[in-house]
Image: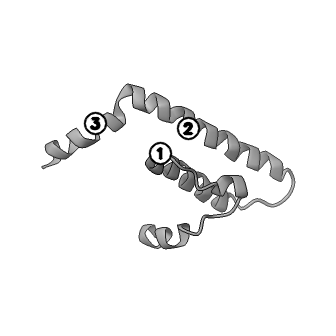
Amino acid sequence: MLIHNSRHFSHAFADKTVAEQEAVIQSYITLFLQRISEANTQSLDICLLLNCLTFDIVGDLAFSQSFNALRDSKLHVCYVPFSSFVM
């Protein structure tokens, strides 16, 4: 069964696809680092920012659409139902 399923996902891990995804991920990491530097001496909720980073990356890679959580420093409304499955 595993052999049959791997065929469906093999295109997602092709060199070209991974290279394209790298640019997307790098853009979110850059924004993440900007948010950290903007905090300067203020307190920072790193857990919130990491959740925003992860949610935006997954949204972009899975749905080709960012949830803009990192940009807004605020979790998307879909995060609450989604997080109950993960935690």
Residue appearing at x 49%, y 51% in the figure: 58
The x and y percentages for residue 37 are 79, 45
Q: Which of 69 and 50 is in front in this view?
A: 69
Earlier sequence position, callout 3 versus callout 1: 3
Crowd around label 3: few <14 · some 14–19 · many ≥20 (10 Å) = few
According to the picture, the residue beneath numbered tag 1 turns out to be 61
Residues at marks 2 and 3 touching, judged by CB atoms closer than 8 Å:
no
The x and y percentages for residue 43 are 81, 61
Q: Report the Cα–Cα distance between label 2 and label 3.
A: 19 Å
| Residue 33 as seen in the image, left or right of residue 5 | right
Crowd around label 1: few <14 · some 14–19 · many ≥20 (10 Å) = few
Rendering quarter of residue 46: bottom right
According to the picture, the residue beneath numbered tag 3 turns out to be 10
Residue appearing at x 71%, y 59% in the figure: 73
Q: Which of 68 and 50 is in front in this view?
A: 68
Q: Report the Cα–Cα distance between label 3 and label 1.
A: 15 Å
| Residue 68 as seen in the image, left or right of residue 42 | left
According to the picture, the residue beneath numbered tag 2 turns out to be 24
Q: Report the Cα–Cα distance between label 1 and label 2.
A: 8 Å
Say which element carries label 3. helix
Rendering quarter of residue 76: bottom right
User: What amino acid type is highlighted by mark number 3?
Assistant: Ser
The x and y percentages for residue 5 are 20, 46
Crowd around label 2: few <14 · some 14–19 · many ≥20 (10 Å) = some
In the rendered image, the residue lying farthest to the left is 1
The relative height of residue 26 versus residue 65 in the rendered view (above or below) is: above
Residue appearing at x 62%, y 43% in the figure: 28
The relative height of residue 27 versus residue 65 in the rendered view (above or below) is: above
